Image: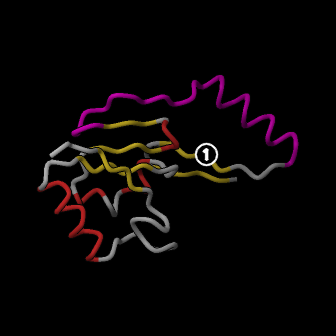
Amino acid sequence: MEQKIIFLDIDGTLTEPGHNEPPESAIQAIHQARKRGHYVFLCTGRNYDMLSPLLKYDFDGIIASSGGYIECQKEVIYDCPMTEEQKQTAMNILKENGIFRTVECMDGSYTD
């Protein structure tokens, strides 16, 4: 059998919208796929901190922050946070234009 990589989004795919726990049927499907030698990755726009309720299911990899953070078999293979200068520039432009800001990073989300 050919090995495959299965990428699961969270909201509306792995979980029902607004929930952080997958149904038992999804958990069983993940176990069956892994048992058959396939890899199962979370793939989401959410930041790493927002994934904490799902990490207990021991995925083979994680793609978070819309691709800004990638982990494969517990090894970080890509992490691309903004530099301090990039952050300040973006925050200043948004503030000057009256735009409400939410900043997401590895350890949480912060808002105005």
Give the colour scheme of this rendering.
Answer: secondary structure
x 27%, y 37%: residue: 72
| Residue nearest the viewer, comparing 101 with 62 | 62
Asked if the magenta segment contains residue 82, the reply would be yes
| Residue nearest the viewer, comparing 5 with 66 | 5
| Residue nearest the viewer, comparing 81 with 71 | 71
State left or right for residue 31 relative to residue 91.
left
41 is higher (above) or lower (below) than 13: above
Task: Give the structural element (helix, strand or loop) at label 1.
Answer: strand
State left or right for residue 29 relative to residue 81.
left
x 57%, y 29%: residue: 82
67 is higher (above) or lower (below) than 21: above
Picture quarter containing residue 52?
Answer: bottom left
Expressed as whole percent of the image width and height from the top left, the position of residue 50 reads 44, 56
Expressed as whole percent of the image width and height from the top left, the position of residue 21 reads 35, 72
Category of crowding for the residue at label 1, using alpha-carbon neighbours closer than 10 angstroms: few (below 14), some (14–19), many (at least 20): few
Identified by mark 1, the residue type is Val
**For the image shown, how many numbered marks are present on the structure?**
1
Instruction: Kindly identify which residue carries mark 1.
Output: 103
Among all residues in the image, which is located at the extreme left?
35
Expressed as whole percent of the image width and height from the top left, the position of residue 17 reads 51, 72
Expressed as whole percent of the image width and height from the top left, the position of residue 49 reads 41, 52
* Residues rendered magenta in the picture: 72-98
Asked if the magenta segment contains residue 97, the reply would be yes
x 35%, y 45%: residue: 62
x 65%, y 22%: residue: 85
30 is higher (above) or lower (below) than 105: below
State left or right for residue 52 relative to residue 37.
right
Picture quarter containing residue 5?
Answer: top left
State left or right for residue 89 relative to residue 18.
right
